[in-house]
Image (tube, helix red, strand yellow):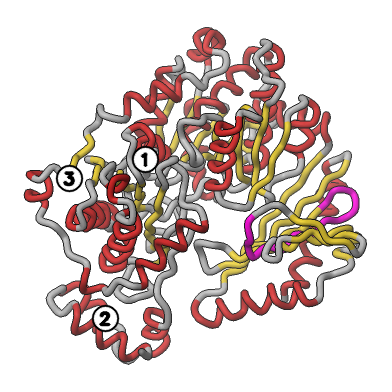
Amino acid sequence: MDVHASYEQWLRDFAQDEDTVKDLQAIAGDEKEIEDRFYTELSFGTAGMRGVLGAGMNRMNRYNVRRATKGLAKYLLQNPEEARHGVVIAYDSRRCSAVFARDTALVLCQEGVPAYLFDALRPVPVLSYAVRHLHAIAGVVITASHNPPQYNGYKVYGEDGAQLGPEAADGVTRFIRATAYTDCVLMDEDEAKARGLLHIIGNKEVDDDYIAQVKTLCIQPELMAKEGANLSIVYTPLHGSGNVPVRRILKEIGITNVAVVKEQELPDPNFSTIKVPNPEDPGAFTLAIKLANEVGANVIFATDPDCDRLGVAVRDKDGDFQLLTGNQIGCVLLHYILSTKQKNGTLPKNGAAVKSIVSTSLANRICESYGVTMFETLTGFKFIGEKIQQFQDTGDYTFLFGFEESYGFLSSTFVRDKDGVNASLLIAEVAAACKAEGITLYDRVQEIFAKYGYFVEKVVSKTLPGKDGLTRMKEIMKELRANPPKEIGGMKVTAVRDYLKGIRAVEGKEEPTGLPASDVLYFELEGGCWVCVRPSGTEPKIKLYVNSNARDKEEAQRLNETLRQASEALMA
């Protein structure tokens, strides 16, 4: 079916939906927009679905949500006994999130799968915890994480509380593709409740248990009891779901001096105070820095709308606020966990940490110095979740910490996705430990660099929207595979990892990477530097990761800039 036929089909199929018809009629005659909305279906993968809101096959709307949900239900009903355990559903503050969550619940009920729907917005980590806590078979979160306000998404979790792996995602996809949009029916809400299929989760059923568990992650509770009241923190939930749980956990571990950015405290689907609700973006901290200067705080926390990511800003020696990168936050937390546990005699001999392949190699050096094994996974926290389960199943390793450079951190095993509440507790504890020593968090970062070497990381994202963009991304990856560079920026390529082929080529020999297939190319360079190229799994972007290290800051930065320019030229 061509794009125009699909466009007309939607007008007929959803003629009773005034909003959908109005949206479609508004693009009549706009050939490019019609093509973009109907040339393909919104893809479903290990990260679920994510896209711009609007009518059409390639847009986030309630019909794509219903279709994905029926596909998920059919997948789960391959084992009816397990499907009876039900699906937990959470949502954040984005446009249509509550509507999409309700539709998800009522489609599941119509298919005979019990649904556990939260009564208000909840963070991703609470959903992950709830799946395990309620012994559900799966979970769904309606969120587009840190994307701009015109986006929303649909993430699916397995019974382990982690996002679906590739095999399960492929299985759900097959059922989605076999489902017609018009075959997705909602059960009446009252009927669903009367039949015991729809359960509304109130504010005590899961939250209290989750917070109690997170509190156990505090490594030095006696330190927090002593120093917590002396800390001054500014926090912004960026209009999202972190407002209640982050403030609660900080209060319960003894931090009473927390100032919240009032303009960003309450849910706002338009995220009207910021360009994007992303703690990686310096603009997200503008109001928080203003407040911190007013109240004299030295540390700022920011969580994204679904509260799975945490950004941190700290005062430097000149009194100015500096944003820590995701890699720096990860390494500060890792160093604190390992050094503190070693000091108090609780560091296990089989300790393990996990990070994504595109995260800093500084973490490897930290682990080596404490005799802890570092494991690397593909990008996507689900793979870190898989490692946690593997460690528990075999008993070979004890999980201590996992992180991704994209501001995702986790030190628990009862949650299987990145956790902004967990991370807030930990970074507050590090800040308290630094205060007790008479130093700042910024000083701690500099100490780590002085000990292990100065590491600089740069991520460059090139947006390639639409059908042409998808083609261009494939062309870039195909060309780099066909003609891999021998050197980048004057630095010799010592090995090439092609994760799609599953091989690492070095000096004419090939060895397996040991990781699942993924469209990623990783170029190892002399001196421990590296460059990685991968298309994003959730956005129309191709991402370039450039990592360099040296004994001093200036040399590491110079190397990074040289590598960045040379790498961008390669992609062009």
Looking at the picture, tell me which residue is in the foreground, 228 or 571.
Answer: 571
| Residue denoted by label 3 | 198
**Image quadrant of residue 432?**
top right
Q: How far apart are marks 2 and 1 (CA)?
A: 34 Å
Kind of residue at disc 3: Leu
Q: In this view, does 129 lie above or below 461?
A: above
Q: Give the range drawn in magenta.
A: 516-529
Q: Which of marks 2 and 1 is in front?
A: 1
Residue at 52% from the left image edge and 19% from the top image edge: 218
Whether the magenta-drawn stretch holds residue 527 is answered as: yes
Looking at the picture, tell me which residue is in the foreground, 204 or 443.
Answer: 204
Whether the magenta-drawn stretch holds residue 225 is answered as: no
| Residue denoted by label 1 | 127
**Residue 112 position in % (x across, y down):** 20, 53
Residue at 67% from the left image edge and 56% from the top image edge: 459
- Is residue 271 something that shows in the picture? yes
Q: Which of marks 2 and 3 is in front?
A: 3
Q: Distance between the residues labelled 1 and 3?
A: 16 Å
First in residue order: circle 1 vs circle 3: 1
